[in-house]
Amino acid sequence: MFLLQSNPLSTPFAPIILMVVIFYLVLFLPMRRRQKKTDQMLQSLKNGDNVVTNGGVIGTIVTLGESDNTVTLRVKPDNVKIEFARSAITGLLTEDEEKK
């Protein structure tokens, strides 16, 4: 009679390996996708885009600093120009969101 014996080292580590795989699929993979999408959005910014910063400031891009990664925004109602780091931009506003 032939009995299958499992490796005594692999049995206790199987739940840990399964947890690592689940964490990767649930947490790290979506985070990497979101970061790639954000990086793509930051690279595609151009003058005239309406954006929102991580501080909640809404403005229109006036100039893009290529070498120092800065963005100058014109903020309404007084048309004040404020300089931000490009990484402070969290999203583009669509025309529908601008009217609200």
Image (tube, helix red, strand yellow):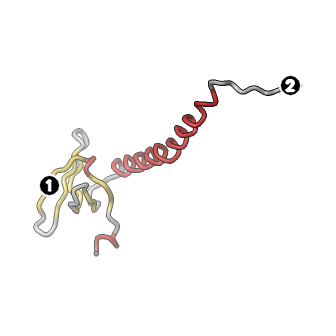
Towards the viewer: 44 or 19: 19
Q: Residue at x 27, y 53 (%)?
A: 89
Q: Quadrant of residue 15?
A: top right
- Three-letter residue code for mark 1: Ile
Towards the viewer: 54 or 47: 54
Instruction: Residue 100: give x, y in percent of width and height.
Output: 28, 75
Determine which residue is flagged by label 2.
Answer: 2
Instruction: Residue 4: give x, y in percent of width and height.
Output: 79, 27
Towards the viewer: 60 or 37: 37
Question: Which part of the image, by quadrant, shows the N terminus?
Answer: top right
Check the image and name the residue furthest to the bottom.
100
Q: Residue at x 68, y 24 (%)?
A: 7
Is label 1 in a helix, a strand or a loop?
A: strand
- Three-letter residue code for mark 2: Phe
Q: Residue at x 53, y 45 (%)?
A: 25
Q: Which mark is residue 39?
A: none
Determine which residue is flagged by label 1.
Answer: 82
Instruction: Residue 77: give x, y in percent of width and height.
Output: 13, 69
Q: Residues within 10 Å of mark 2 (few under 14, many from 20)?
A: few
Q: Is residue 44 left or right of residue 67?
A: right
